[in-house]
Image (cartoon, rainbow, N blue to C red):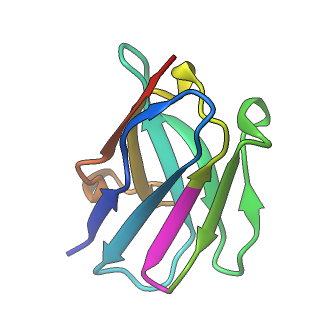
Amino acid sequence: QVHMVESGGGLVQAGDSLRLSCAASGINRRAMAWFRQAPGKQRELVARISITGVTGYPNSLRGRFTIARDSDDNTVLQIHSVRPEDTGVYYCNTYPPKTDSWGQGTQVTVST
């Protein structure tokens, strides 16, 4: 059974940096991604990383987010200089995402 556990969120001030971590179990090495859902909005892709380490970001988010693997089972997302619009719940999943693999996410709240 696939299980994702996200951690590292919290209340931060605009301009801070934040490191989120995703521990995945029950899957073989796969492409992974981070998503986020802001209040009242649909979940959106933030960053993805292939099995070989190739990364990809939406144009609108390019430059402030860095995705990386620090082990076969752990994927991290570094957010540089957070902004209030980065507030939301951050999730990790395979890429493409599997419907039954969503975890609880980790809440990020950015204050001004």
Horizontally, is 100 left or right of 10 in the view? left
**15 or 88: which is nearer to us?**
15
Q: Which contiguous range is marked in magenta? A: 72-77
Location of residue 84 with respect to 1 vertically, above or below: above
Horizontally, is 107 left or right of 84 in the view? left
Residue 84: where, in percent of width, then height? Answer: 53, 20
Residue that appears at 55% across and 20% down: 85
What main secondary structure does the magenta stretch of the protein show?
A: strand
Residue 52: where, in percent of width, then height? Answer: 71, 81
State which quadrant residue 101 falls in: bottom left
Residue 37: where, in percent of width, then height? Answer: 41, 30
Tell me, yes or no, whether the highlighted magenta stretch contains residue 30: no
Residue that appears at 78% across and 41% down: 62
Looking at the figure, which quarter contains the N terminus? Answer: bottom left
Q: Is residue 21 among the parts visible in the rendering?
A: yes
Horizontally, is 10 left or right of 58 in the view? left
- Residue extending farthest to the top is 40
Residue that appears at 57% across and 70% down: 31
Location of residue 32 with respect to 30 vertically, above or below: above
Residue that appears at 33% across and 57% down: 7
Location of residue 107 with respect to 29 vertically, above or below: above
Residue 43: where, in percent of width, then height? Answer: 44, 32
State which quadrant residue 89 falls in: top left
Q: Is residue 96 among the parts visible in the rendering?
A: no
Q: How many marks?
A: 0
